[in-house]
Image: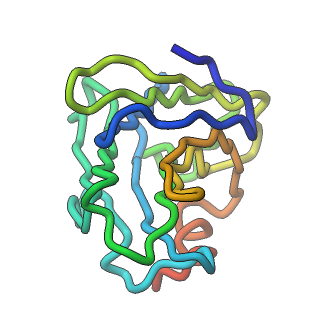
Amino acid sequence: MTAMTPGSNIPLTAARVAVDVAAPVRLDVSGLLLTADGKVRSDDDFIFFNQPSGPGVTYQSGGGTTPDKITVDTAAVPPGIEKIVVTASPDAAGQSFQGIEPTATIRNADDGSVLATFTPPQLGAETALVIVEIYLRNGAWKARAVGQGYSNGLAGIATDFGVSVEE
């Protein structure tokens, strides 16, 4: 198992990986399927509790007792999708990540073995995070620790990646 730091990456040794995100508070976790230009093809590429499955990517709620999880089946990700970003935001409106840093655990989805963990350091006013990304590079799938925060919540992330957000 690898403890990742911001910007670090690992090759994925499993075709199906699960990313669960845990924190001391309930989180909303989601996944976005992105093309080479860093945008979704349509709102169908935004995977979350109200739309729990998409091509090669599924969302599973932990029900408040275990972490929410995004599972990526790299063999089922459609051509043209080069990155799946896993995001998290506190479920409580307006709550920031200060003092409640989340930990993402990347697992082999078939046997549950831990491939890597990542806890973004020194968070403050961020109300949403891109925590990790699963990406395709030279024909091989990898995972990168990101930890990029947004102060305008999940709507800020979704808008940045081309999702239509209704107020």
Q: Residue furthest top?
A: 1
> 14 and 152: which one is in front?
14
Residue drawn at point x = 27 percent, y = 21 percent:
112
Residue drawn at point x = 41 percent, y = 31 percent:
13
> 160 and 108: which one is in front?
108
The answer to which image quadrant residue 52 occupies is bottom left
Residue drawn at point x = 64 percent, y = 38 percent:
145
105 lies left or right of 111 = right
Residue 131 location in percent, x, y? 58, 43
**Total marks placed:** 0
Q: Is residue 45 above or below residue 102?
A: below
Q: Is residue 1 above or below residue 76?
A: above
> 48 and 9: which one is in front?
9
Residue 117 location in percent, x, y? 54, 23
Q: Is residue 111 above or below residue 88?
A: above
Which colour style is shown? Answer: rainbow
Residue drawn at point x = 65 percent, y = 37 percent:
9
Q: Residue furthest front?
A: 138
Residue 125 location in percent, x, y? 75, 45
Residue 26 location in percent, x, y? 39, 35
Residue 167 visible: no
The answer to which image quadrant residue 64 occupies is top left
Residue 126 visible: yes
